[in-house]
Amino acid sequence: NNNMQHYPRVAWRMGRRWPLAPSLLLFAGAAAAAAGIKEASPPRLFQTFRGPLPTLRGDAALFQPRNRLACWSTPPPGPRARGQSFQPPGGNNNMQQPTPQNSGGGGGGGRQQPQQQPQHQQGRQQAPSTLGKLASNPETLYETLTEAGNDWADKSAAADLMDETKKSLLAQLTVEFMRNGGTKSAAEAKALAAPEYEAHIKKMVEARREANKARVKYDSIKVYLNMLRTYEASRRAEMQML
């Protein structure tokens, strides 16, 4: 107790002789107290959790900007593409047929038979359309558009030529019937009912039909090409915004 009474004076004398002595004493006491608290503290939460952090999609690589842009154009394959069957949340899959098995003798031994796919799945596995194949190659689509335009131009010119020759054929038949005797109106009526003129009219209608079909084909490919251009432009704009 007597020593404690003289502690301030001793500390003052030590501080006068050694100015850093009180600071060192306080720092040593604080370090000892912190060490005692650290040893007595319970383990923290992040130290006990050693597994990877959970993510929304289950794959942290998809959240990277470059990987997200790469996966944007091609969606991830579904369970059918990976060879897995779809299972509903309830676990009762009524769409999947049970696999028949052979039981009994005869060397069957419970061998599984190949399962037949439903009709709607077989329809989905058919070959894609022609436009779908052309969409993967823009150069081929452009060449097809050019060929369709040339075909339409040729057939349209042939139909126009048949339309022009109709007038000359009608005039020629009218002159022939006028030579046999008769008025111009009667000769023209006979020319309109002549088998040659009717055959020419049928050929003209068929040529015009083929020209219209070629025009529809050209317009369809052109509209499809414009849709692809619009889709690519919007996709690039969205990629720049990300």
Image (cartoon, rainbow, N blue to C red):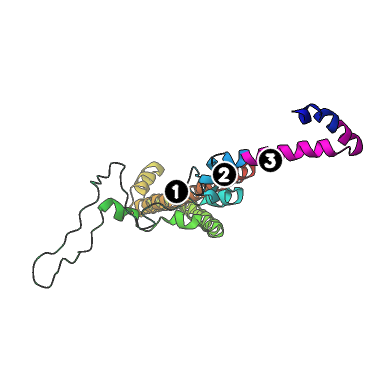
Q: Main secondary structure of the magenta part?
A: helix
Choose the circle earlier in sequence order: 1 or 3: 3
Where residue 62 appears, as percent x and y from the top left, is 54, 49
Circle 1 sits in a helix, a strand or a loop, which is it? Answer: helix
Q: Are marks 2 and 3 in contact (CB under 8 Å)?
A: no
Is residue 130 shown left or right of residue 42? Answer: left
Q: Are marks 2 and 1 in contact (CB under 8 Å)?
A: no
Q: Which of the two marks, 2 or 1, is nearer to us in this view?
A: 2
Is residue 108 shown left or right of residue 228? Answer: left
- The residues tagged by marks 1 and 3 sit, at their Cα atoms, a distance apart of 97 Å
Q: Nearer the viewer, residue 52 or 171?
A: 52
Question: Which residue is denoted by mark 2 in the rendering?
Answer: 230
Circle 3 sits in a helix, a strand or a loop, which is it? Answer: helix
Type of amino acid at the residue the image marks with label 3: Ala
Q: Nearer the viewer, residue 134 or 219?
A: 134
Callout 3 crowding tier (Cα within 10 Å): few <14, some 14–19, many ≥20: few
Task: Please give the range of residues in magenta.
Answer: 12-36
The residue positioned 48% from the left and 45% from the top of the image is 57
Callout 2 crowding tier (Cα within 10 Å): few <14, some 14–19, many ≥20: few
Choose the circle earlier in sequence order: 2 or 3: 3
Where residue 98 appears, as percent x and y from the top left, is 20, 54
Q: Residue furthest top?
A: 5
- The residues tagged by marks 2 and 1 sit, at their Cα atoms, a distance apart of 27 Å
The disc at residue 32 is: 3
Where residue 236 appears, as percent x and y from the top left, is 61, 46
Question: Which residue is denoted by mark 1 in the rendering?
Answer: 212
Type of amino acid at the residue the image marks with label 2: Thr
